[in-house]
Image: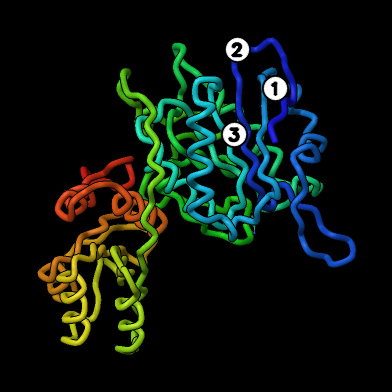
Amino acid sequence: MEKEVNNMNSPQSILIIYTGGTIGMMKNPETGILDPFNFNQIEDQVPELKKLGHKISAIQFDPPLDSSNISSDVWVQLAVIIKDNFDFYHGFVILHGTDTMAFTASALSFMLEGLSKPVILTGSQLPISDLRTDGKDNLITSIEIAAAEKGGLPIVPEVCVYFENSLFRGNRTTKNSAENFNAFKSFNYPALAQTGIHIKYNFQAIHYPDKDEKLKIHTRLNKNIAILKIFPGMRENYVDAIINIDNLRGLIIETFGNGNAPNYDWFVSRIEKVIQKGVIVLNVTQCNSGHVEMGKYSTSKDLKRAGVLSGFDITVEAAIAKLMYLLGGEYSYSEIVAHMNLSLRGEISLADIH
Ligand code: ASP
C-alpha cells in the first residue's frame, strides 16, 4: 500500500517504509499481547509529521511484521523498494522492530552498493501510542536526518540506525538492551551524529560515495551459513551437528576474547576439514568491543594455520550479512577470501587494526 501523508511545498521528499515492530503496535485489551496496527494509526499518533514541512509518502507491509519474522526475503523486498523509488526521494526511513534491526541494516548496507542517499532504520522500545513512547522522537528525527542536505547533497548517504540521540552506521550496530531507550550500540565505530538541541554530524566518520557512483542492488543472498558459538565444555557432537549441516558454505566461529578457541586436536582438526571442503570460516569475537587478533595467543594460532579468516572487529550481524552477500555473488573461493579481508561498506576498521 502506498499513500501520501502530506504534500507541502517543500523540496525534500521522504519515503517511509513501515515494516512493523513495536513502534506500530498496540496492546490487545483482551489478550494483553502487542499486535501491530497500520500506518494510518501511526500518523494519527504523530500529528507533528504534518508540521515537518517535508513531502512524506509511506509504503506499508501488509501485515506489519514483528522483526523476529523478518527473513532475508524481506531484505530483498526492501532493497527493491529502495531501488524502484530511488530517483523520486531525497531519503528513506525504514520503520522496523528493534530485535533484528541491526541484521537488516547490515544486510542492506551490502545489498545497496554505491548508495548516495540516506536510508535510516528506526523503531522504538515503547509503542507510539504509549504516553512515554520513544517512537515519536525516533521517527521525527530520522525523517530530519534523511532530509538533511549540505551544499545540495545528503549529509548521511549511508544505511544507518537512529535510536535515542545517536545515529550509527547500520552495519556497526548491535541491539544491546531489551529495556533501555538507548537500545543500540556501535562498539567499534563512532556515532555518525548525536542529537540534542541540535543534530551534530560527525562528518569525518561518514562515508561519501564517488560522484559518479550509481546505485546497484544485490539481491542474491546465500543462506547456507551457520554460527558455531563456542563455550567451555562444548562437546564434539555439538560441533559436528553444526559443521555437518547440508550444503554449508560459510561458518562463523564465535570465539573468546581476541579470537581464541580451544586448541584441542579434535576441535582444530574438525575446523581444518571444513575449510578443506571449501567452506569459508570466519573468526568473530564474542566480545562487544575490540577485535580478533589471530596468532596473539597459541589458542588462535592453529585456527589461523588451518585457514580460518579474521573477522577483525565485525559484528556477528554484519558477518552474517557479508557472508550471505559474498556467497550469493558470482565470486570464486579466493575472491571471497580477498573480500572478507577488505572493508566493503565500512563494516571493519582495518586502518586501526593493522
Ligand atoms: N519484537 C519487536 C520487534 O522486533 C521488538 C521491537 O520492535 O522493539 O519487532
Dot 1 amino acid type = Leu
Dot 3 amino acid type = Ser
Dot 2 amino acid type = Pro
Instruction: Give the left or right position of residue 236, taking residue 30 as reference.
Output: left
Q: Which dot, 2 or 3, sits closer to the camera?
A: 2
Instruction: Give the left or right position of residue 311, taking residue 242 as reference.
Output: left
Q: Which dot, 1 or 2, sits closer to the camera?
A: 2
Q: Which disc is residue 142 wearing?
A: 3
Above or below for 137 versus 282:
above
Cα distance, mark 2 to mark 3? 17 Å
Name the spot of residue 269 as percent of width and height, x first.
16, 81
Above or below for 339 versus 216:
below
Cα distance, mark 1 to mark 3? 12 Å
Name the spot of residue 175 as percent of width and height, x first.
52, 56
Q: Residue at x 45, y 37 (%)?
A: 159
Q: Residues within 10 Å of mark 2 (few under 14, many from 20)?
A: few
Cα distance, mark 1 to mark 2? 12 Å
